[in-house]
Image: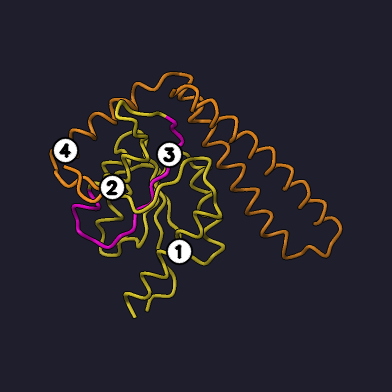
Chain colours: A yellow, B orange
Amino acid sequence: MKSKNFILVIDDDANVRNAICDNLGICGFNMIQVDDGKKGLSYIRSSHPPDIVITDIIMPGEEGLAIIQQIRKMKTNIKVIAISGSGNVLMNGSSFLDMAKKFGADAIFPKPINMDELENTVMSFSKAMHRMEA
Amino acid sequence: MIHSGKLTGVDDNLLLYKKVTGLAAEESSDEKLLHELNNALTVILGNARFLAIKLDDQKNYEATKESLEKVERIRIAAEKGAALVSRLQKSKSS
C-alpha cells in the first residue's frame, strides 16, 4: 500500500498553487505544482502519474477542461478536482465548474477555496484509493 | 450526450469546450477583476489557515496567542471579502 498520495496542482497563479500545496502538504501528501496545462499533462502521462490532480479551469494555453478531457480519455483512476474563480454563468445556466463536472471532474471548488473542505475531499479520495489497493 | 451527469460523446465535449473557452476569453474587465479577487482571497485564506495550524502547536506562548488572534482577524476579513465578491458575481449573472 502506498503511504502518501502524489498530488499535482495546476494553476497559473503561483500564490494560489503555494497556498494549496502548503495546506495539503502539512497533511503529509506529496505535492508537486506546475504553472500550465502542458507541463501538467506531461506529469499525467509520465510513468509515475499523480493520484490526484487539482486543476484551475481558466488558464493561458491548455485550459483545465482540456486537461480533464485528456485524463478521462486515458481511462486512469486519477481523481480530478477542478477549481475556478470565475463566476461566469453560461447560456444554459451552467458555470465553468458545472462544465468541469460534466467533463468528468470528481469534485469542484469555487475560489476562494475552502481549504478545510478541500482537505476533507482529498482525504476521502486518498482513503478510497488505499482501500482499493488493499 | 449526457449520461449520468457526465458528457460521453467526444464531439459534444469538443463543442462544449469551444463554447466555454470562447466565453472565458470574452470575460468582461469587471468579471476578470472578480476572478482575480477570488484568487487573491484564496491566497489570503490559505495562508491564514496554514499559519493558524503552525502557530497552534505553540499556543502556550503569549506572543503566539496574539499572532493567532491577528491571523483570525485576517481570516474573518477575507471571508467577508469573499462574500462580497460572491454577491457581485451573482448580481452580474442575474
From the image, tell me which residue sits under label 1.
Answer: A30
Alpha-carbon distance for marks 4 and 1?
A: 35 Å
Q: Count residues near mark 3 (Cα–Cα under 10 Å), then give few for <14, some for 14-19, many for 20+.
A: many
Alpha-carbon distance for marks 3 and 4?
A: 22 Å
Q: Is residue A76 located in the magenta-colored stretch of the structure? A: yes
Alpha-carbon distance for marks 1 and 3?
A: 23 Å
Q: Secondary structure at mark 4?
A: helix
Label ID, residue A68 = 2
Position in image of residue A26 (x %, y %): 57, 62
From the image, tell me which residue sits under label 3.
Answer: A84
Q: Do the residues under discs 1 and 2 have CB atoms within 8 angstroms?
A: no
Residue type at the position of mark 4: Asp
Q: Secondary structure at mark 1?
A: strand
Q: Residue pushed farthest right?
A: B62
Q: Count residues near mark 1 (Cα–Cα under 10 Å), then give few for <14, some for 14-19, many for 20+.
A: some
Q: Looking at this view, is A9 or A94 the one in front?
A: A94
From the image, tell me which residue sits under label 4.
Answer: B12
Q: Nearer the N terminus, badge 2 or badge 3?
A: 2
Alpha-carbon distance for marks 1 and 2?
A: 21 Å
Q: Do the residues under discs 2 and 3 have CB atoms within 8 angstroms?
A: no
Q: Do the residues under discs 2 and 4 have CB atoms within 8 angstroms?
A: no
